[in-house]
Image (tube, rainbow, N blue to C red):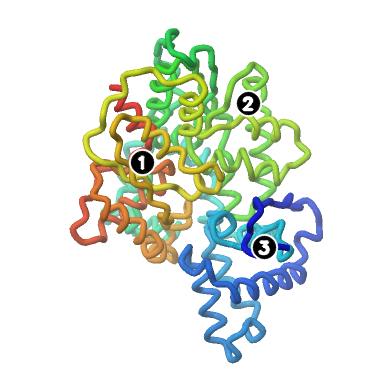
């Protein structure tokens, strides 16, 4: 054994189909074991609110040690985890193969899986996790839906807060009438046959967010890839299940993994790369699904074929080369390095992509945005989410950027809201995606 997590971290298969996984006494024993090690280390104190809550519990106990903390008081610690994976990926010196064998996020996932099985997942959590249903319905009535969900609407937002526990102060995503799938079907962009990467083929996995909320990200991706010589189509068989993972609904996640991997298998067999348009979805497809369904060959095949957008562009730049013609950006860029991009352990590919633009000045902000998927929207979490995201907001303001981007659309939405709370901050109209800046540099 060596101290300090000097070897590459590994993760265990999640045994969610075994009855022992749901043994509450075994969970409690593991929570005590892990929390006691965390108490002796405390390197994660500034990542999220789970660890300050845990350390306060211990410090305010009669003995100042975990032995005098009641297990029933662990719930706020469990509730504060957003499953961002940053403790596992960037801080913890005791992740496997270290003999202490710590995986804090997957321990919290187990606790939530047990709670979900017992029916403890709240109704708002369950309903907001149904992203495909919600997106399809909202797209049918996007005008009224966006009006009703807009911050400052004092007629509807208090009702939404009372019924769904969504804080009236939280900025919420807007929906589009024409989904990304529909818009791309009507678009005919010629493939640049003179490009060095001509001959590549890719399928864009639209993701629920790009499909229903930000189709511009998908359209920018298609414009860039067509210019680079890549033939592109789009598929969206269903959500990746990340919102259900946050709830501990592992059966629901597995169902989505089977659905999507089966639908995308013909594209992979035809020689197409799969590009996920949101980093949370890429993380699920590359890493979480194979741990949940380790014996499913389609899931493994999909994991091996999946790229993030920026990862794919950088891959082209390194292997075949880009098409000339990138123009300088006006002013510096602050790029928020989203947690679910960092958790893929591939480095800041979006910053690497943006630095391919001539004279690009890119500062990378590695602090959490504080949104945590749907977590930061709820009334009990909103203020905590703003607090957690404030260091990221301050770092962006300090960089004095002309452009602010994040690969995670919900992180971008939340960072903008954090910036509104900071004095003298120049708040952008919108925090976009790095691929949109790259497309603009090509003149699209």
Q: Foreground mark, 3 or 1?
A: 3
Q: Is residue 272 left or right of residue 279?
A: right
Secondary structure at badge 2 equals helix
Mark 2 — residue?
A: 264
Mark 3 — residue?
A: 102
Disc 3 residue crowd, few under 14, some 14–19, many 20+, Cα 10 Å: many
Disc 1 residue crowd, few under 14, some 14–19, many 20+, Cα 10 Å: some
Q: Foreground mark, 3 or 2?
A: 3
Residue at far left of view: 424
Q: Is residue 391 left or right of residue 67?
A: left
Residue at far right of view: 19
> Is residue 220 placed above or below 279 in the rendered structure?
above
* Depth check, front residue: 166 or 16: 16
Disc 2 residue crowd, few under 14, some 14–19, many 20+, Cα 10 Å: many
Q: Provide residue 400's location: percent of width, then percent of height.
A: 23, 49
The quarter of the displayed image where residue 99 is located: bottom right
Q: Provide residue 168's location: percent of width, then percent of height.
A: 34, 58
Q: CA distance from mark 3 to mark 2?
A: 34 Å
Q: Foreground mark, 2 or 1?
A: 2
> Is residue 368 placed above or below 348 in the rendered structure?
below
Residue 176 seen from this side: no
Q: Provide residue 341's location: percent of width, then percent of height.
A: 50, 44
Q: Which residue is found at the position 34% from the left and 26% from the top?
A: 439
Mark 1 — residue?
A: 174
Residue 280 seen from this side: yes
Q: Is residue 361 left or right of residue 55?
A: left
Placement of the C terminus among the 4 image quadrants: top left
Q: Which residue is found at the position 46% from the left and 28% from the top?
A: 313
Q: Provide residue 329's location: percent of width, then percent of height.
A: 25, 32
């Amino acid at each position: 054994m060596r101290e300090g997590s000097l070897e590459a971290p590994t993760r265990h298969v999640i045994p969610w189909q075994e009855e022992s996984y749901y043994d509450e006494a075994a969970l409690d024993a593991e929570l005590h074991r892990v929390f006691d090690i965390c108490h002796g280390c405390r390197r994660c104190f500034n990542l999220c609110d789970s660890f300050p809550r845990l350390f306060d519990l211990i410090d305010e106990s009669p003995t100042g040690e975990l032995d005098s903390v009641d297990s029933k008081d662990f719930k706020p610690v469990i509730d504060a985890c957003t499953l961002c994976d940053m403790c596992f990926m960037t801080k913890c010196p005791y992740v496997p193969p270290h003999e202490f064998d710590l995986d804090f996020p997957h321990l919290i996932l187990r606790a939530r899986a047990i709670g979900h099985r017992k029916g403890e997942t709240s109704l708002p959590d369950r309903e907001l996790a149904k992203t495909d249903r919600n997106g399809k319905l909202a797209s049918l009535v996007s005008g009224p839906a966006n009006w009703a969900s807009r911050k400052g609407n004092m007629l509807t937002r208090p009702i939404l807060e009372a019924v769904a526990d969504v804080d009236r102060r939280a900025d919420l995503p807007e929906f589009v009438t024409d989904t990304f799938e529909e818009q791309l079907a009507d678009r005919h962009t010629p493939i640049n046959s003179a490009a060095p990467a001509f001959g590549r083929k890719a399928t864009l996995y639209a993701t629920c967010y790009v499909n229903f909320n930000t189709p511009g990200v998908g359209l920018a991706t298609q414009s860039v890839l067509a210019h680079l010589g890549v033939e592109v189509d789009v598929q969206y068989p269903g959500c990746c299940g990340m919102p259900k993972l946050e709830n501990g609904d592992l059966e629901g996640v597995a169902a989505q993994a089977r659905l999507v991997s089966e639908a995308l298998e013909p594209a992979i067999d035809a020689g197409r790369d799969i590009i996920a348009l949101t980093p949370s979805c890429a993380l699920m497809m590359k890493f979480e699904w194979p741990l949940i369904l380790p014996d499913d060959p389609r899931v493994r095949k999909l994991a091996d074929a999946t790229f993030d957008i920026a990862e794919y562009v950088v891959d082209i730049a390194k292997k075949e080369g880009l098409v000339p013609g990138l123009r300088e950006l006006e002013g510096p860029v602050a790029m928020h390095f989203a947690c679910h991009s960092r958790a893929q352990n591939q480095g800041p590919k979006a910053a690497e992509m943006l630095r391919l633009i001539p004279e690009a000045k890119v500062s990378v902000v590695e602090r959490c945005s504080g949104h945590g998927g749907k977590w930061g929207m709820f009334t009990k979490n909103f203020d905590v989410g703003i607090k957690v995201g404030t260091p990221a907001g301050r770092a962006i303001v300090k960089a004095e950027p002309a452009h602010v981007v994040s690969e995670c659309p919900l992180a971008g939405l939340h960072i903008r809201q954090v910036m509104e709370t900071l004095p003298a901050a120049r708040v952008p109209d919108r925090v976009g995606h790095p691929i949109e800046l790259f497309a603009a540099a090509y003149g699209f």
